Amino acid sequence: MDNAIYVGLSRQMMLERELDIVANNLANVDTNGFKFEDLISSADKVSTPRAGGPSQALTFVQDGGVARDYSQGAFTQTGGPLDVAIDGKGFFQISTASGTRYTRDGRFKLDSTGKLVTQDGDPVQGAGGDIQIDPTKGQVSIAKNGVISQSGNQVGKLQVVSFDSLAALSKDGANLFENVSNVTPTPSTDAVLEQGMLEGSNVQPINQITRLIEINRAYDAITTMMSQTSSLSTTAIQRLGAVNPS
Amino acid sequence: MQALRTAATGMAAQQLNVEVISNNIANMNTVGFKKQRAEFEDLLYQTIVQPGSQSSDSGTVVPTGVQIGAGVKAGSVYRITGQGTLSNTGNSFDMAINGAGYFQVQMPDGTTAYTRAGNFSVNDQGQLVTEDGYLVQPSITIPQNVTNVTISQQGQVQVTTAGTTAPTTVGQVQLATFLNDAGLEAMGNNLFTESGASGPATAGNPGATGYGVVMQGYTEASNVDPVSEITDLIVAQRAYEMNSKVVTTADQMLSTAVNTKS
């Protein structure tokens, strides 16, 4: 009898986790280069609910994983000379204090020494390490293949890398991804860089709001089921335990 | 429930976004104003199942893992230093910079500030000053009985006095450039100061390599684009609303859970 309540509880916990993920998606609806996520639930089969009892399928709900959708976000034109969006697969390589990270957020700027950095000040990696730009040497133009030039002279080349399996990436906050497997990134072949553009978040607000409604209703339904199960036990105890059953 | 706090970070971020947008719109007609943009980034993730961790002895790995994000934060409020349009004022002491560079202004405490607002005037001693009366550096004094003032694109200030025909040079306007002028610190009154992020100022004459030219009789309007500000405002408002829906949903779920025990 209690199993119904425990199965319901496992579903409730999953729904709360799903809500956390939807909340994070919606909080990042305006974050450049953000990739939305969805919880995958799986059935966790326990074959023997009772020791020695008849074998009866009992299935708990379990979180199988978080699926991340790497589809491209909408491009917005900013006109910023150091704003770059990647059209196609791939990531920019960023060198941070805790190692190499990857991002699709191409809002770059110069630091006080003229180095191309992210908004957190971490250097963007080019084909040959850090990229140095001297703003007095003329306008910066970034070609579709990542070559950065000023007044016709090449000053660096943005490196875009891609992964065979995107499951190797883990989110690290600050719009960065970390490579947590031993998959080696390779230079991307099909990526096209767009100067003066930024890739927005790929969160679809309508889908997320619909998910919110679903989660809310499912939580209501499962709670009702649990409360009915509980009142069933109460009634049973009252009926069966009465001295003079009517 | 994490969702409540996550949604709160989303609402706080959009509130900041609206504050930045409203400051841009308020300064739509401020001479030399440069628009700002709030930049967001996602917060840290709580890793519940590490992607790529081993799921069995035979070397199979978890393909996706479970990571739950904690919301969003404002990474920076970035100044877009693009050129504003030049508007003709006809005032001979007004100057606009077409290209890179800042005018240098001596503050009352002796430090140097930088500005793109070239709506200058002369004070009672004939010195070129900003609209707050601060001296423009290097200082330029306009003598009395001047009939005509000409400022060349290279910043040379020449005057013609009554009774003479040949103009005399009385000063040279200089501009300062920075490696990262988006990193200058705004101090109000259209003025900026050098910061650790901007790098040191390098002074030079207008028209030299890497410096803009000076246009006499013009001022530089703000580079705020009202249409894009209004569309950004709509996006910010909707995003705020969506995050508030998450708060409502989380609240309803908590209420359902609490009311289970009657």
Image (cartoon, coloured by chain):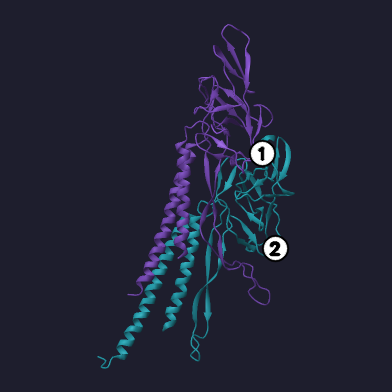
Chain colours: A cyan, B purple
Q: Nearer the viewer, residue B150 or A185?
A: B150
Looking at the image, residue B102 lies above or below residue A235: above
In the shown orientation, is residue B96 left or right of residue A99?
left
Q: In this view, does A195 lie to the left or right of B253?
A: right
**Which residue in the structure is indicated by mark 1?**
A140
Which numbered dot is residue A183?
2
Residue B45, position as x, y percentages in the image? 56, 62
Residue B228 — which label? none
Quick one: quadrant of the N terminus of chain A? bottom left
Front position in the image: B6 or A79: B6
* Image side of residue A11 versus residue B204, left or right: left
Mark 1: secondary structure: strand
Residue B126 higher or lower than B62, as above or below: above
B167 sits to left or right of B243: right
Q: Position of residue A160 (x, y in %)?
A: 68, 51
Image position, residue A93 (x, y; %): 67, 53
Q: Going 60% across and 47% down the picture, which residue do you hit? A: A107
Q: Which chain carries label 2?
A: A
Q: Which residue is at the front of the view, B22 or A46? A: B22
Dot 1 surroundings within 10 Å: few (below 14), some, or many (20 or more)?
Answer: many
Residue at 56% in and 54% down: A34
Above or below — where is B152 with respect to B31? above
- For the point 48% across and 43% down, the residue is B20
Residue A239 location, quadrant: bottom left
Amino acid identity at mark 1: Val
Give the CA separation, mark 1 to mark 2.
34 Å
Pick the quarter of the image with the C terminus of chain A.
Answer: bottom left
Query: N-terminal of the two: label 1 or label 2?
Result: 1
**Mark 1 on the same chain as mark 2:** yes
Q: Residue furthest front?
A: B109
